[in-house]
Amino acid sequence: RSTDSKSKLRMIESIAEFSFTPERFVTAFDPLKEGVHTLKKVLAKVNGAGQRVNRVIIVTNWDAESFRLLYNNKKIRKILERADGIVVSGIVGVMKPDTRIFRYTFEEYGIDPSTELTILIDDREENCKAFESMGYRYARSMMVKNNNFKAIRRTLKEWQVY
């Protein structure tokens, strides 16, 4: 019986290894259309002089190798290149919800959430809570629930970001 269990375990491990390699994952990764639409609208907002008013920094918990593979996907790279910067946890060595990744981002991109509206949009509650726990006056977070950006867009409009 233990031989049977070991065989099943090896089979499961083989399937998992085959299915979940970074190379396979990034070819199957398709960004959320609503999220991309929201990103484009936020980046398209301009002031009276026609200058873009919002910056977008992507902070992701991807490992370095998987992110490199993802970035090599032309469709994904085209979207990512719209951002003003990207912070990859696997490169900087700290992951959300650890607030050090947010502090790193603020320093790296000259962001001062005590004087300028700084928004985290994330799909994990613990990341949003950690961001707001930092105590900055203008740090806000919004959680995307069930890939629904409708409430996000409504709030961004209220905050005159969208």
Image (cartoon, rainbow, N blue to C red):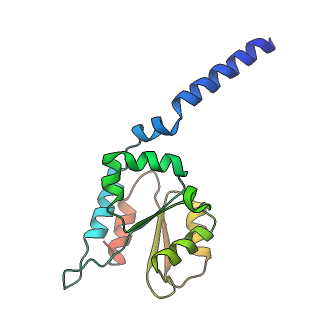
Q: Which residue is at a point 40% across and 38% down the rendered structure image?
A: 27
Residue 75 or 131: which is nearer the viewer?
75
- Image location of residue 157, percent across then percent down: 32, 73
* In the displayed structure image, the side of residue 91 where residue 36 appears, left or right: left
Picture coordinates of residue 127, whole percent (x, y): 57, 63
Nearer the observer, 23 or 134: 23
- Above or below, 112 relative to 8: below
Q: Where is residue 80 in the image (x, y as percent from the top left)?
A: 36, 57
Horizontal relation, residue 74 to residue 25: left or right? left
> Residue at 57% across / 24% down in the picture?
15
Q: In this view, does 102 lie to the left or right of 31?
A: right
**Residue at 41% of width from left, 42% of height from top?**
29
Query: Which quarter of the image is occupied by the N terminus?
Result: top right
- Furthest-left residue in view? 49
Occupied quadrant, residue 18: top right
If the image is split into quadrants, where does the C terminus sit? Answer: bottom left
Image height of 152 relative to 21, above or below: below
Q: What is the number of callouts on the image?
A: 0
Q: Which residue lies furthest to the bottom in this view?
A: 115
Residue 13's x, y, as percent?
64, 26
Instruction: Determine which quarter of the picture holds residue 28.
Output: top left
State the residue at coordinates (31%, 62%): 82
On screen, residue 3 versus residue 123, left or right, reads right
